[in-house]
Amino acid sequence: MHPEAVRWTEDGAAVDLLDQTRLPEVEVRLRIERASEMADAIRTMRVRGAPAIGVAAAMATAVEAARHTSLAPGDFRARLAEAIELLRGTRPTAVNLPWALDRMHRRAWSQADLPNVQIVHALFEEAHSILIEDRAMCRRIGEYGFEVVPVDGAAVLTNCNAGALATAGVGTALAPRYTAQSLGRKVSVYVGETRPLLQGSRLTAWELERAGIPVTVVADTVVGTLMAQGRIGVVVTGADRIAANGDAANKIGTYGLAVLARYHGVPFYVAAPSSTIDADTPTGREIPIEERDPDEVRRGFGRLTAPESVDVYAPAFDVTPAELITGIITDRGVLRPPYGEEIRDSLGLVASRASQG
């Protein structure tokens, strides 16, 4: 049974989140009833992972709208627009967030002449569609990505968490491994800690152990040695945004993994749903990179780990150039270089997103 990062509450009136800041020590679920509560949960990474925050924000938009049905139509739309912009501003790198919120905005404004209650009903329908679509996309990523899972006993290496905790389904980078498990192929996983917030050791290791999949945690600095020793058959990471040319933004340190993989001749794949491809961003140079609070580095988990006065540079993401990526595993197939052509040909519907309003 995979953990559910985001779901509706039993009464269907709020969003139910698994608080990922509390893992692996304890499982705590949060009831989110306002857009402001969801915005805080996204900023503080109680919910994280590009697909998951897109789904969660869409659901919170519907929940927030339901609070304002008694307002005049103009005031109702103003409150809804404020909620959408509040959520949009929480994390700048992951494109799934504006992708989902744009869908919610289009759905609401396409029915602006209807009574508020009917608009709210439409918004709940749209949010639920985004939830169900993400689950289906994750499943297809697992099916397409199964072909890259090693068969010779070598392990899969990943970083951060791109599993069920990062999506509404079985994940992206971990989805092929779950498919392998369901088909009886035994493949182990190495995961780097993923400093400074340890999403690899706290979240991926917890998730895989819970699923009965062999997993070994290593310090981020060990991954080159693993490759040199021939222990790694393939590297599979997630992505928070993929540019039109195939450059991919993911958790800080992913670029270094790709460089090491190229040097050691290890295939390097990125796994992401088609909603993560941003056809409006030409290259990785244009992807906005979020910078986190310096104290996440300076005071790791409440303990002083660097001098108080020292400068800290804390980008949350880096960009892996397309030329270092062996393939991009999507819900529509495995894309191969040259990615610009592949993205245009295979994901034309995504490329036309801007024309939808």
Image (cartoon, grey):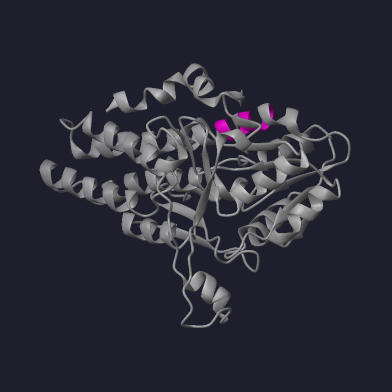
Q: Between 65 and 282, which is closer to the camera in this rendering? A: 282
Asked if residue 110 lies left or right of residue 59, the reply is left
Residue 39 horizontal/vertical position (percent): 36, 57
Q: Residue at x 48, y 65 (%)?
A: 313
Which residue is located at x 28 percent, y 40 percent?
Answer: 120
Q: Nearer the viewer, residue 190 or 105?
A: 190
Residue extending furthest toward the right: 152
The answer to whether 22 is drawn above or below residue 18 in the figure is below
The residue depicted at 59 percent of the width and 50 percent of the height is: 165
Looking at the rendering, in which quadrant would you find the C terminus?
top left
Membership of 127 in magenta stretch: no
Image coords of residue 263 (percent x, y): 73, 43
Residue sitting at x 65%, y 62%: 202
Image-quadrant location for residue 28: bottom right
Q: Is residue 72 visible?
A: no
State how many labels appear.
0
Span of residues in magenta: 136-143
- Examine the rendered structure and indicate whether residue 89 appears above or below residue 182: below
- Which secondary structure class fits the magenta region best? helix
